Image (tube, coloured by chain):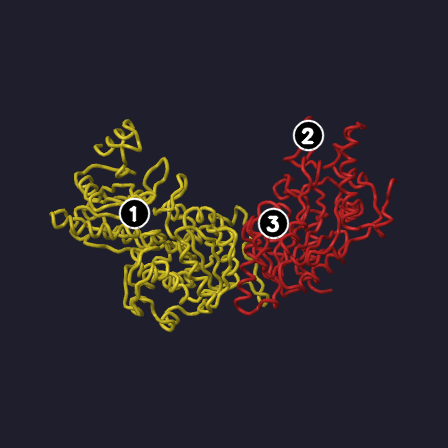
Amino acid sequence: MATNLLAPGHTACLGCGEALAARLVVNAAGPSTIIAEATGCLEIISSRYPESAWNVPWIHSLFDNTAAVAAGIAAALRATGREGQVNVLSQGGDGATADIGFGPLSGAWERGHDVLYVCYDNEAYMNTGIQRSGLTPFHARTSTSPPGRQSLGNPTLKKDLPAIAVAHGVPYVATTSVGWPRDIERKVKKALSIRGPKYLQIHVPCPLGWGFDPSQTVDLAKLAVSSGLYPIFEYENGILTGSMKVKPVPVEEYLKRQVRFRHLFAAAKPELEEQVRAIQAVADANLVKYQMVTPPAEAPTGA
Amino acid sequence: MKRVMEGSMGVSEMVRLCRPKVVAAYPITPQTHIVENLSQFVANGQLQAEFVNVESEFSAASVVLGASATGVRSYTATSSQGMLLMNEVVYNIAGLRLPVVMTLANRAISPPLSIWNDWQDSLSVRDAGWIQLYAEDNQEAADMHVQAYRIGEDPRVALPVMVCMDGFILTHAFEPIDIPEQAEVDAFLPEYQPLYKLDPADPVTVGAFMEPDKYMEARYLIHQAVAQAAPVVEEVAESFRAAFGRYQGGLVDAYRCEDAEVIFVTLGTLASVAKSAADQMREAGKRAGVLRIRCYRPFPTKQIRQILGKGAKVAVLEKALALGVGSIIAPEIRNALYGSDTPVNGYILGLGGRDVPPATLERIFDHAAAGRSADGLFVDLKAEHLGDEAFAAWQAQWKE
């Protein structure tokens, strides 16, 4: 077996979806890759001085500037005639990507640097202790969106970052999930075959942050997709060119297995059931929008 | 060849001759002309570089960080709020030991919004780990950029260098500037040889985190690197003199200090005003001298001790202030003179582009010569904007 470019021995939690996905990503990208990494779990688990888990050149600058650092790397490669010979991978968690680092990311997309940006989406600021981010889903409990008498958890819908990437004219925008390792590898390779900006958002369940047993990471990842809550798709040049086909399962099957949604099922109250139906509506809309049920005409109706 | 040109053009021409591979910038007055010129050079094919038009100063600094870490010479420029927005990255560039060169066209800080000159922007990052050079005229501003790359890229240094030039006073002023030939600059400034770089052929991990048992040593080593850059700054100034026949000082530039009764200590273009005022005062029997700090970081403690501390009273002229404290530079001069009984007065003047005429400096001379003390004493405030009570209270400070 080939050497892992993200070596074992790092300090990730048991069952960490992000660490698994990051290894798949860098192995798919190969040794001729430079990584710019945002502050966050992945940085912390892999780069405690004097050790490093990275077998590719890797730089961590700050939490909020990763896309711009990667742009600088890409500009330097271009200026020295090496564009296309070395992959530039920029990566961070959902907070680094969708919130604090979004300005630089938007700028980098618009300028068109030859960089693959990978967002490891575990749907909250896990490294600082599970605080809400712009990619935290509706009604999820986090340490800064706790449910209480006046609250049912995170009050906002998940920011649609892939759509924002598509709106920038990013030629390749895709989502994937750690539930499908081969899909991650395929999309990384495909992305890197395209010159220009690329965005890949990977759903990576977090046992600690979401509240589930570490043995269930891949199962949870799969349920998120098959429920429709985490749609898996590809946009090429603004056109939806592919999506994962699923046999839809009710969102409860996914939500009930996580502490972060437990408050929605704490009592059999009509108002709580209504909120679960609201989440179901989000999932149903995704299944239709991204054509995840084959054929679309046979999507479940009235069932 | 000497040509009359804008200070910004002089800097742009010199930066072009330094052959940076990546230039990233975001527009802010009064820095704009410099980067406009550079973008034109790239558009004309006169500079083979990637010009990255970023969406903020924060990204400008981050792009040159990434480029420099990839092993290429990089350049950016900013002013004022741009420097404040870059702040986090400015510290990071220094800590990662990346020899980026930045021009800072010195400008006041908001609020109130002011596009005009003072040094609050650069002094706010004096402790970030950059070498800070301050130019007195446009020839020096241009020359400092060649010196800056040579200093910063020296393997004994490996630090970023900030060339500070007074906004408008220099950036927009036309003076004759000698721009050397490319071959002369190439001979003085060899191709950048990084100590480390991001390269798949030899993978390195950059920016690892450290636990309490190691962090302090890392900060100590960065601190030592900045402090130990001082002789390199002097050495490069001498090499520059040998190569180009111009010398504007090493770490400091002392003017008529030997027999002075009062020595003005200052930075940048204010030194020119002070030198001219000193000449005039000497005609009236007032022995004034000027010590210009050319390199503010590392701080030239040894040189300051050699020149000051010989009986002359010291009047530090600062276009900056630490809110709630007063002077920024004066306490550092006192610190450098620790153990001597030299009185060091701190005067705050010229904020937000307020003119500093020679008559003001003569008033300061008289105040210091009379043995009065000043610590962050504001100069030339106006009654009509302060109100009578505040104005009277300020006037009283001058009599203490």
- Relative depth, front residue between B107 and A29: B107
The hue of chain A in the figure is: red
Q: Is residue B233 left or right of residue A204?
A: left
- Relative depth, front residue between B320 and A41: B320
Q: Is residue B2 left or right of residue A96?
A: left
Q: Is residue A131 above or below residue B23?
A: above
Q: Quadrant of the N terminus of chain A?
A: bottom right
Q: Determine which residue is flagged by label 2.
A: A151
Question: The residue tagged with tag 3: helix, strand or loop?
Answer: helix
Could you tell me how far apart the alpha carbons at marks 2 and 1 are, in whole angstroms? 59 Å
Q: Determine which residue is flagged by label 3.
A: A44
Q: Nearer the viewer, mark 2 or mark 3?
A: 2
Q: Determine which residue is flagged by label 1.
A: B336
- Relative depth, front residue between B330 and B232: B330
The three-letter code of the residue at mark 1 reads Ala
Q: Chain of mark 2?
A: A
Q: Position of residue B66 (x, y in %)?
A: 53, 58
Could you tell me how far apart the alpha carbons at marks 3 and 1 are, in whole angstroms? 41 Å
Q: Chain of mark 3?
A: A
Q: Chain of mark 1?
A: B
Q: Nearer the viewer, mark 2 or mark 1?
A: 2
The three-letter code of the residue at mark 2 reads Ser
The hue of chain B in the figure is: yellow
Q: Is residue B120 left or right of residue A126?
A: left
Residue B135: image quadrant is: bottom left
